[in-house]
Amino acid sequence: NAGVTQTPKFRILKIGQSMTLQCTQDMNHNYMYWYRQDPGMGLKLIYYSVGAGITDKGEVPNGYNVSRSTTEDFPLRLELAAPSQTSVYFCASSYSGQGSQYFGPGTRLLVL
Amino acid sequence: AQKVTQAQTEISVVEKEDVTLDCVYETRDTTYYLFWYKQPPSGELVFLIRRNSFDEQNEISGRYSWNFQKSTSSFNFTITASQVVDSAVYFCALSGDSGAGSYQLTFGKGTKLSVIP
């Protein structure tokens, strides 16, 4: 039981490049989330999903897209990377909407 | 709108001292959930506790204890006999029961705890 896994662990992007951050959970959780954490700050929600095929925007969705084709996977897509997207990205999952969220190890992204 | 305030940005204590991390929250929901997470230097987020708004009993887990007071909208976290391994950033978070709040955690900015040997 691996919990929530994220790949890659670290990535450097040039401005304007695109990439997909992968997130997989093996706990059969319906709810999944993407957060970003900027230095000295708490986490801010980018997108979330309440089940396969259903996604919705969080607090800071601009510049990102998500899809949820399976219960296990919730990839986050950056289409045109900008320096403002330099951050640590965390994926999380929970059994219910108010349930405890379990986080992946994070992906550190640097946009230059 | 929901808000979580952790007024202590950084705290340093000497090993074996007790330390309390403060958390004050704002919400209009009558049903809500409060959480504490630990983020050690390695960077992962570790779930510590979840408490619903109807349960004001204090909770103790080993050296950790939590004091939930609705009257003051606070959910404070105390570490007894601190150890070097407790050094981390601790986040308090709030999840509401409204349509928008149900699915997101509102995080405080965190308190960095340094335990000095």
Image (tube, grey):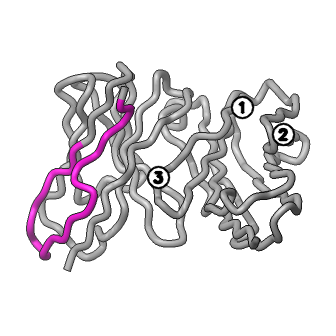
Instruction: Name the image quarter holding the C terminus of chain A.
Output: bottom left
Residue B27, picture quadrant: top right
Q: Which residues are magenta?
A: A2-22
Q: Nearer the viewer, residue B91 or B100?
A: B91
Chain hosting mark 3: B
Nearer the N terminus, badge 2 or badge 1?
A: 1
The answer to whether marks 2 and 3 mark residues whose Cβ atoms lie closer than 8 Å is no
The answer to whether marks 2 and 1 mark residues whose Cβ atoms lie closer than 8 Å is yes
Q: Is residue A16 magenta?
A: yes
Residue under label 3:
B44
How many residues crowd around disc 1 within 10 Å: few (fewer than 14), some, or many (20 or more)?
A: many
Residue under label 1:
B51
Q: Nearer the viewer, residue B17 or B68?
A: B17
How many residues crowd around disc 2 within 10 Å: few (fewer than 14), some, or many (20 or more)?
A: many
Picture coordinates of residue B83, whole percent (x, y)? 75, 58
Q: How many marks?
A: 3
Q: Amino acid at mark 3?
A: Glu
Q: Residue at x 30, y 70 (%)?
A: A86
- Is disc 2 placed on a helix, strand or loop? strand
Task: Please say if A1 is above or below A11.
Answer: above
Distance, label 2 to label 3, CA atoms, is: 25 Å
